């Protein structure tokens, strides 16, 4: 943590030093010159940018990149004041020596950490909003393709869900719950001040990230207006520092496997046992059973039973190589980096390779005029398998279809074409077919900043982002998938161009020493244009050729483009008095092309304030309190509909009939379509005491009105639903963050940080107050957005092994009856049709959070993070196929859990008696497939060693570190069916679950 | 200070360069209603209506296959696709909502076309003809969709003279919050007959492959009369088409291969599928194809009703794999464009696949053969065995010239048997049984048939009509559910 603070400090120092040097360069010749070197007491490293001033004068200097300074004195004596943000100020009386070397102590009391916030930076103490910074050190070693995946457990109020363990798969992030049904729940990502698309984060090299800030409340995020409803994640990339060029080289390699067992299948012996048992129970005679076994080939294969997991999965390997160089002089600074990231997934034929290159340049034209440019080029190549219930999803096949009696290879060792039920042999399909995507992305952001007059700065930024995707879907003529078309291939090219222009004026001034104001006004225009074209061809001559020109049947083309635009005016006013009272207000006016003229423009605003109690005189006596701050904010932000043209009545021309274009009435006109509005209230106390403990407690309430709801309408109208702004939803809860420097001695340090979040999501209003119910879930007022709605399972009858359900009336209340003992008990039925659905819980956890411990001893550092969630439920979505208790045995695989079945009267079993071809709905949707999902997981653990300076200097290195890092190493979970970290909906999917990865890495600086 | 002005100026410039219309953007794949001004524009919307008819929940699959698997000659090899219908497992909670929604989408589209036509004045003779023809087609599509919905969701007219609930009649563009009530079957039939009666004189009497014309509308009318037991009108309408239309029965020698053709001499209306625009994997052709999904198959029992000399038996193509249930195999009515039986057999023997997949076949909706059997059925119901025999034998003798039915042997059962043979897998059988109050009898030939498939369905069973999907009743509580659901 301290290292990180230093980074900020150094960055700021470098800027300051430029400033100071400029002002003091003209100093005239003087009598005496004092020189020296300033180092940090903590590690002995030189400190650049330390201000050195002769006390009581304006005469000063600052240290250069190597910590050296030189100052000329007018007088013969005096006191030198060495000060630097983050360090304890030291005063040294000038003696006879002309060399004064100083070592500065880190000021742990100092809280003036600089943080990146919306449209600028601020000191942490003066910030009136709710924001969290993530130390890049905490995430830089986690081997992920995209940085959001590593945020789990680090920030209160923030949760992360990986849709899949496949390389390059997307990630969803939620900040303080979910506020929308249909307009998206992902936060806004802002890189170096520019809002970017939340997809394609995999083109950003996590190693380039200098700082990350998560904006959570209205005060922090409202300035981003119509896109800030779900919070904002600010990313700042590294910039060069004046001084000798520094080079860094990082290399790592990791190995991955499933993090937990997921829907394990029975082994071959058990498989046959279950089959036999089910047929006997169904009353089939020996001949019939023999016939059935023979028909389906249900016997041990010559080479033994097959474990399909071995056929379809492997150990994944992740390799990462990064190189960066930074440096510059007082005028021009640079940071350049190159990165190769290569990951092979645990599923065969899935991988990702990414190359990125970045140049960040700044140049001071003169003392008022600065310009800069950030440029990134990235290329990502991804091979993947389909997800969902596609035949070619290996995890789907494994957990739903695989039979241990069936081998992928025939007697001659050739791959079979088809397996049972005519399904494709995916091992063979993988060898022959290909699905891949190549993403090219080029991002340029150029800016110019001019100081018009003292305190008044104008900055204008232009941003251009170009993403090009080339997708290939190829089915070989020899594969089953391509057989009918004699081989097919589909090429899709997608392009997205985003252009943003932003002009901001800021004015910063302190009056009468105590009154400080900061005013910002700005104007932004953004345009985002997406287009694609696709060509599909069939009849491909050979395996070896994968280009469209060789397809003799050009079988289809399609393409379209769409564009959205946004115009914004924004303003913020900050005032603070004596570092004690802070007030901030912001307003933004956004106009979007996604809305009709009635509702096109909207205003978003925020008001916030904070009060540093600890600055009051009466508190000064309580010396153990370092900081105590109260803050409150209220404000609005918005969320645009996802559809670009949702307000218009349209005829869609994407279809045809008889080779003539066909226009089809595609949506209702809705000129009143508007933004979803978030109203955020946040109240918090921040504290630190005894120089060891710090933290914050925060209450928040986030209410969304004008929620876009897809209202189911009578199909008689010709449509099934229409989007209306009619719903309301609420998220409220609290966040607690605690940090403690347990031990902090010269050699040994132990620090702990803990965060916990409680979010209660509730649907407040629906169309006509009517619940929207589905087969397993319901949206109903007063309950969370994700609410399970199921018939209640009453277990297996101990006497006859039949499935049972509790009887629930149409209102969803249990029915009761008097049992033999005269007691009122819940009524039970054997007939699934006799009961109704009821509200059965939510996947939302009551609490989630993380606990990080960092221990360091000299150069050795151990850090580990546990994340946890308590109180949510998980729905085993495919249970109705995989726990069939004997039904559909010719279609599905059997899961290990099914072994716990009823066999004889008196058995208390999880699953009913196994009966071949049963049709009593035993596996129909019910709470039989709903489980508590509490878990705690060792998310990350890393052990790093920094070689001592004495050694590295000999090797001409400035630093050398080695580390061992593991992700998802251990998991303790209430249910043992599958990985507990699933989608927010709490539904298991067939996506490849989380993996555990162990990585070894080296970092060199020279 | 000069710089200040430059920068201030560029700020102002940036602010003013974006006017309000910067935010007016249009979709690249859609157009608004204002863009529809000419008959040519409306023609594309009419094609939209045809596109909806070709939906996989409508004529490219659902309305045909889901009906056939409820009857006795076709079955489903899947527990999901078609299985729900085959096993009569549909409930308001679990049913195919497309059966309800897609025809209503077609009705909305037809009403859109009619509204636009209303607003366009046709002056030249060719414009008047075009406008009339489009109006006729839109009215016919609207009528067909109402009739089809009524067949699925309302009891047969014959059960109670149309007094039970049919479906809401929609002749205007509804607002999104409209909650219409069901009309009676009788009212729906009246509306259908009314629309058709207006439409028929407006349309071409020429053959218009892939489109509805004068004769297609009349065919619907004949079928409606037959279902309504207006037998005299059914007879006269069918006779009119047989006598006056340009269509002719396909001859015996061409019969089997004619299914590989896009259009035959007896195609009154077929859904046009092209090599690139077709129902794809979820269409009836692929469902019936052993190289495709293969879940729509003929029963073994079906082979027993054909004599060997019957040319139609040739269409029953033996399954080349051992299937344990009562499966005969494929009915070669959706073989793929140009895929004659010879080609299919040859390809199978060589282990190859044909270049045009089965889903490229057009879907026949109305064939002239139907009019002969409508005439025969209407005649026998009108106690006219002479004409019944006359028209029946045209179909019987085409299939097997030696199988002539004697006037003395003719009865309704004989005519329904012929319909069964002629229209297998074309979506007729279920309605032929239920509207004639006949039970559905489907004994198992092998023992290990899934017990979930009911063997006997009484003609009065409540599930001979589909339930209104629960999602629909949630959105529109004014819709009364069918009895016993």
Image: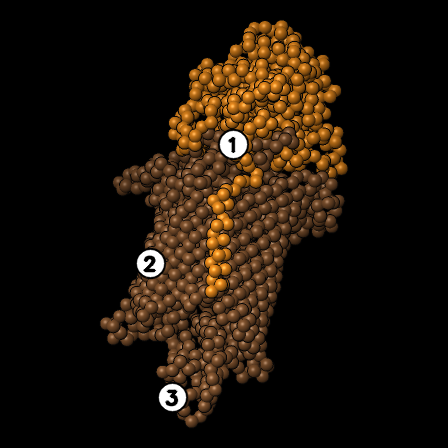
For the C terminus of chain A, the image quarter is: bottom right
Please state the horizontal and vertical placement of residue A993, each as a whole percent of the image: 52, 54
Q: Chain of mark 3?
A: A
Name the residue tied to disc 2: A608
Q: Is residue A221 left or right of residue A466?
A: left
Residue located beneath label 1 in the image: B33
Relative to A242, is A349 on the left or the right?
Answer: right
Q: Residues within 10 Å of mark 1 (few under 14, many from 20)?
A: some
Which chain comes out brown in the rendered image? A
Q: Nearer the viewer, residue A617 or B455?
A: A617
* Chain identifier, colour orange: B
Residue nearest the observer in this picture, A798 or B313: B313
- Going 41% across and 59% down the picture, which residue do you hit? A520
Q: How is the model colour-coded?
A: by chain
Q: Which residue is mark 3?
A: A78
- Where residue A7 appears, as percent x and y from the top left, is 47, 72
């Amino acid at each position: 943590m301290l290292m990180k603070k230093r980074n900020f400090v150094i960055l700021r120092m470098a800027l300051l030093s430029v400033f100071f040097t400029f002002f003091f360069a003209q100093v005239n010749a003087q009598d005496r010159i004092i020189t020296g070197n300033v180092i940090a007491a903590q590690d002995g490293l030189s400190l650049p940018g330390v201000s050195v001033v002769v006390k009581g004068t304006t005469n000063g200097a600052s240290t250069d990149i190597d910590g050296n300074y030189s100052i000329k004195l007018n007088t013969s004596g005096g006191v030198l004041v060495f000060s630097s943000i983050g360090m304890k100020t030291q005063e040294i009386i000038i003696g006879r020596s002309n060399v004064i070397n100083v070592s500065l102590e880190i000021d742990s009391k100092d809280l003036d950490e600089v943080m990146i916030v919306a449209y600028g930076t601020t000191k942490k103490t003066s910030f009136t909003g709710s924001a969290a910074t993530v130390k890049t050190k905490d995430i830089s070693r986690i081997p992920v393709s995209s940085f959001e995946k590593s945020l789990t457990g680090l920030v209160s109020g923030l949760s992360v869900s990986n849709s899949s363990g496949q390389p390059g798969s997307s990630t969803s992030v939620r900040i303080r719950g979910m506020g929308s049904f249909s307009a998206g729940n992902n936060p806004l990502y802002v890189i170096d001040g520019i809002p970017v698309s939340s997809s394609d984060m995999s083109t950003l090299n996590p190693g380039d990230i200098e700082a990350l800030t998560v904006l959570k409340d209205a005060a922090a995020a409202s300035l981003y207006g119509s896109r800030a409803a779900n919070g904002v994640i600010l990313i700042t990339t590294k910039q060069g520092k004046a001084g000798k060029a520094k080079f860094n080289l990082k290399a790592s390699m990791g190995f991955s496997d499933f993090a937990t067992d997921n829907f394990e299948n029975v082994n071959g012996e058990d498989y046959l046992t279950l089959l036999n048992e089910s047929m006997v129970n169904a009353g089939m005679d020996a001949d019939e059973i023999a016939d059935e076994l023979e028909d389906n080939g249900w016997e041990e294969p010559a080479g033994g039973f097959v474990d399909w997991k071995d056929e379809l999965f492997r150990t994944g390997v992740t390799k990462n190589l990064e190189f960066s160089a930074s440096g510059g002089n007082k005028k021009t600074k640079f940071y350049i980096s190159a990165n190769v990231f290569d990951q092979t997934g645990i599923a065969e034929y899935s991988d990702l390779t990414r190359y990125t290159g970045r140049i960040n340049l700044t140049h001071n034209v003169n003392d008022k005029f600065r310009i800069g440019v950030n440029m990134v080029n990235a290329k990502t190549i991804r091979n993947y398998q389909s997800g969902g219930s596609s035949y070619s999803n290996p995890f789907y096949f494994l957990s739903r279809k695989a039979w241990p009696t069936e081998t992928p290879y025939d007697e001659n060792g050739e791959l079979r074409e088809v397996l049972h039920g005519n399904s494709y042999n995916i091992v063979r399909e993988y060898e022959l077919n290909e699905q891949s995507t190549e993403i090219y992305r080029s991002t340029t952001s150029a800016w110019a900043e001019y100081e018009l007059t003292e305190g008044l700065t104008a900055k204008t930024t232009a941003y251009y982002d170009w993403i090009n995707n080339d997708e290939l879907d190829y089915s070989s003529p020899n594969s089953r998938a391509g057989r009918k078309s004699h081989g097919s291939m589909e090429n899709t090219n997608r392009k997205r161009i985003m252009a943003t222009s932003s002009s901001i004026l800021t004015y910063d001034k302190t009056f009468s020493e105590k009154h400080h104001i900061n005013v910002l006004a700005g104007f932004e225009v953004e345009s985002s244009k997406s287009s694609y074209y696709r060509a599909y061809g069939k009849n491909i001559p050979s395996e070896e050729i994968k280009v469209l020109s060789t397809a003799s049947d050009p079988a289809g083309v399609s393409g379209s483009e769409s564009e959205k635009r946004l115009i914004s005016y924004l303003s913020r006013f900050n005032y603070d008095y004596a570092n004690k009272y802070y007030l901030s207000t912001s307003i933004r006016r956004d106009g979007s092309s996604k809305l009709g003229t009635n509702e096109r423009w909207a205003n978003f605003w925020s008001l916030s304030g904070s009060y540093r109690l600890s600055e009051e005189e009466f508190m000064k006596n309580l010396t153990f309190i370092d900081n105590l701050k109260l803050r409150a904010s209220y404000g609005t932000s918005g969320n645009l509909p996802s559809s670009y043209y949702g307000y218009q009545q349209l005829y869609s021309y994407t279809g045809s009939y008889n080779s003539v274009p066909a226009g089809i009435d595609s949506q209702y006109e809705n000129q009143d379509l508007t933004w979803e509005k978030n109203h955020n209230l946040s109240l918090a106390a921040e504290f630190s005491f005894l120089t060891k403990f710090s933290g914050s407690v925060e209450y928040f309430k986030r209410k969304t009105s004008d929620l876009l709801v897809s209202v189911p309408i009578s199909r008689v109208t010709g449509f099934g639903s229409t989007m209306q702004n009619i719903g309301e939803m609420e998220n409220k809860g609290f966040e607690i963050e605690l940090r403690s420097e347990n031990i902090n001695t010269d050699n040994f340090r132990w620090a702990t940080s803990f965060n916990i979040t409680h979010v209660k999501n509730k649907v407040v209003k629906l169309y006509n107050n009517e619940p929207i119910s589905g087969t397993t879930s319901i949206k109903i007022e007063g309950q969370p957005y994700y609410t399970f709605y199921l018939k209640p399972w009453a277990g297996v009858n101990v006497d006859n092994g039949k499935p049972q359900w509790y009887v629930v009336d149409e209102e969803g209340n249990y029915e009761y009856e008097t049992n033999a003992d005269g007691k009122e008990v819940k009524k039970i039925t054997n007939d699934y049709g006799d009961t109704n659905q009821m509200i059965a819980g939510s996947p939302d956890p009551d609490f989630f959070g993380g606990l990080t411990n960092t221990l360091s001893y000299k150069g050795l550092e151990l850090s580990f993070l546990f994340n946890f969630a308590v109180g949510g439920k998980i729905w085993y979505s495919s249970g109705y196929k995989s726990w069939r208790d004997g039904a559909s045995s010719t279609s599905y695989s059997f899961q290990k859990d099914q072994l716990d079945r009823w066999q004889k009267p008196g058995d208390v079993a999880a699953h009913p008696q196994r009966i071949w071809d049963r049709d009593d709905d035993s596996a129909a949707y019910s709470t039989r497939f709903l489980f508590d999902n509490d878990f705690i997981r060792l998310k990350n653990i890393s052990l790093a060693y920094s070689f001592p300076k004495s050694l590295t200097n000999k090797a001409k290195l400035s630093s050398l570190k080695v580390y061992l890092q593991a992700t998802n190493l251990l998991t303790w979970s209430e249910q043992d069916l599958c990985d507990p970290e699933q989608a927010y909906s709490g539904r298991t999917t067939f996506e490849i679950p989380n993996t555990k990865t162990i990585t070894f890495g080296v970092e060199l600086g020279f | 200070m000069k710089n200040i002005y430059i920068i201030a100026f560029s700020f102002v410039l940036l602010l003013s360069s974006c006017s309000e219309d910067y935010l007016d953007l249009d979709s690249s794949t859609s157009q608004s209603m204002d863009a529809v001004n000419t008959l040519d524009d409306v023609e594309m919307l009419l094609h939209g209506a045809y596109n909806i008819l070709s939906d996989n929940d409508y004529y490219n699959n659902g309305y045909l296959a889901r009906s056939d698997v409820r009857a006795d000659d076709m079955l489903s090899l899947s527990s999901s696709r078609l299985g729900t219908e085959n096993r009569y497992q549909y409930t308001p909670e679990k049913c195919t909502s497309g059966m309800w929604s897609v025809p209503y989408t077609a009705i909305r589209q037809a009403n859109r076309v009619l509204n636009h036509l209303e607003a366009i004045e046709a002056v030249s003779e060719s414009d008047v003809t075009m406008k009339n023809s489009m109006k006729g087609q839109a009215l016919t599509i609207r009528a067909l969709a109402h009739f089809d919905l009524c067949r699925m969701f309302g009891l047969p007219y014959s059960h109670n003279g149309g007094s039970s609930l049919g479906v809401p009649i929609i002749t205007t563009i509804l607002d999104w919050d409209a909650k219409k009530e069901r009309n009676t079957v009788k009212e729906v039939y009246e509306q259908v007959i009314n629309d058709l009666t207006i439409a028929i004189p407006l349309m071409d009497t020429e053959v218009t492959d892939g489109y509805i014309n004068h004769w297609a509308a009349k065919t619907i009318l004949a079928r409606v009369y037959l279902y309504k037991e207006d037998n005299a009108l059914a007879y006269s309408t069918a006779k009119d088409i047989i006598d006056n239309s340009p269509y002719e029965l396909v001859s015996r020698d061409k019969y089997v291969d004619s299914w590989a053709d896009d259009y035959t001499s007896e195609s009154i209306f077929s859904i046009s599928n092209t090599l690139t625009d077709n129902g794809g994997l979820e269409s009836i052709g692929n469902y019936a194809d052993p190289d495709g999904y293969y879940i729509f198959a003929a029963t073994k029992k079906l082979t027993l009703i054909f004599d060997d000399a019957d040319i139609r038996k040739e269409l029953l193509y033996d399954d080349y794999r051992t299937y344990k249930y009562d499966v005969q195999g494929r009915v070669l009515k959706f073989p793929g464009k140009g895929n004659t039986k010879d080609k299919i057999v040859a390809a199978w023997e060589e282990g190859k696949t044909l270049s045009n997949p089965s889903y490229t076949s057009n879907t026949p909706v109305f064939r002239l053969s139907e009019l002969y059997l409508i005439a025969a059925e209407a005649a026998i119901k009108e106690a006219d065995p002479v004409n019944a025999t006359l028209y029946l034998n045209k179909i019987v003798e085409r299939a097997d010239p030696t199988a002539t039915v004697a006037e003395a042997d003719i009865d309704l059962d004989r005519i329904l048997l012929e319909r069964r043979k002629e229209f297998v897998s074309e979506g007729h059988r279920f309605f032929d049984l239920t509207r004639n109050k006949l039970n559905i009898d489907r004994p198992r030939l092998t023992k290990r048939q899934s017990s979930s498939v009911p063997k006997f369905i009484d003609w009065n069973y409540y599930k001979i009509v589909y339930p209104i999907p629960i999602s629909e009743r949630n959105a529109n509580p004014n819709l009364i559910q069918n009895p016993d659901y």
